[in-house]
Image (cartoon, rainbow, N blue to C red):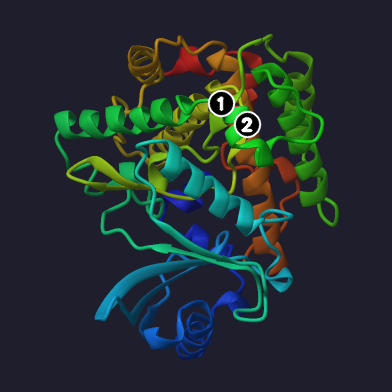
Amino acid sequence: MSATEIAEGDNHSEVARPSESRRDPNDLRDALHAWLRGRLPDDADPTVVEVHLPDANGMSSETVLFDAEWTEDGTRRVHELVARIEPGESSMPIFPSYDMGTQFAVMKTVGDLSDVPVPTAYWFEPDPAALGTPFFVMARIEGIVPPDVMPYNFGSWLSEATPEQRRTLQDASVGVLAALHRIPDAGENFAFLRLHDAGPTAEEAFRAHLDRQRGYYRWATADGPRSPLIERALDWLEANVPADPSPAVLCWGDSRIGNIMFRDFTPVAVLDWEMAALGPREMDVAWMVFLHRFFEDLATVAGLPGLPDFMRRDDVAATYAELTGHTAENLDYYSVYAALRHATIMFRVQSRAIAFGHATLPEDPDDMIMHRKTLEDMIDGTYWAGLP
């Protein structure tokens, strides 16, 4: 699928979703009701009163919104909740494993050790008996999210906001990264994220992360086409790893504004922790900038004005330095890494779409990467200089 096709209105999340991943809300309500009865005290008398499946569900972990009522301290209360459910094997998942327990632990630890707004993490359920796969439950927060489909810079509440409001949102989003990276003793507090062969420095953690990324690529292409461009990018990255003796920090991983809920252009919930890792802080900074550039490049293909003055790399880096006292280094390099990671994920997504009969395999497998030219230009060192 080309960038032009996406720009003309295809719902990419729907293309990538297997039809069998859709659950019946009535069955979910009954299953969650039975599960809550086993989780809460006998006198709580829980009832699940409503279940809702978001329209954009199914690209990664499944999300289920539900309201549950139970008695606590003698008072009957309604709780607005979210269940994040590990995808089943039959759904051809985007990632080889999801480790819902680790995602739950990251979110809970971030909530305990920082002022980053994360939803209250209630329970992790490792037993697949209740819903078919492991899941966790967290509080539901009211807010709005910059949409991915259609991308927010194609026309949305964010593109219709004033430049000052967008700058408020931008700076606050960078502030989330600053707050995460300030969490002390990340190597100890998030020791469960350390890869088996990683040392304590940012460079050592990144080298292990890069090795795991190559392993992810092998897994994603084991039964399908391979990408010469992704393999070239992996080789280039491995040959040019920057020296960085600073301590590894907690990296959110999927650090994009589409994973933040906002009210009045201020973050109220930071979501999606499945890509969390220990590593150099530049991984998060570059990913946040790159994901906006990805949408900007799509807008250019579609002939739309986009938001070229939003999330500019120099502005993001300057705000980050002001908030942390740390100057982000080697952002060209980590931008290539961000583009490579996104390319591998999208390659898997397209392989998924082909497997479900929603797309056909192109003659050149690299055409499965929507931002192919961006990645090529980044490796060649010409991308950033060509921007307006």
Residue 17 x %, y %: 58, 67
Between 62 and 158, the one lying in front of the other is 62
Disc sitting over residue 185 in the figure? 1
Q: Is residue 339 visible?
A: no
Q: Do we see residue 385 in this rendering?
A: yes
Name the residue: 55% across, 32% down.
Answer: 251
User: In the image as oriented, which residue stretches furthest toward the front?
Assistant: 73
Residue at the image point whose x is 49% and y is 82% from the top: 32
The quadrant in which residue 382 appears is top right
Identify the amino acid type marked 1.
Asp
Tag 1 near tag 2, CB within 8 Å:
yes
Report whether 178 appears left or right of 215. Answer: left
Query: x, y percentage for residue 146?
Result: 32, 48
Alpha carbon of mark 1 to alpha carbon of mark 2: how far? 5 Å
Q: Is residue 208 found left or right of 356 in the rendered image? A: right
x, y percent for residue 190: 60, 37
* Residue toward you, 314 or 326: 326
Q: Is residue 227 left or right of residue 176?
A: right
Residue type pointed to by label 2: Glu
Look at 65% across and 33% down and name the residue there.
340
Element type where label 1 sits in the image:
loop
**Vertically, is 14 above or below 238?**
below
Front residue (pair 64, 80): 80
The residue at which mark 2 appears reads as 188
Q: Which mark is residue 245?
A: none
Residue drawn at (35%, 51%), measured in percent from left and top?
147
Q: Looking at the picture, how far across and down is residue 113, in whole percent?
A: 44, 37
The residue lying toward the viewer, choosing from 387 and 235, is 235
62 relative to 43 in the view: left or right: right
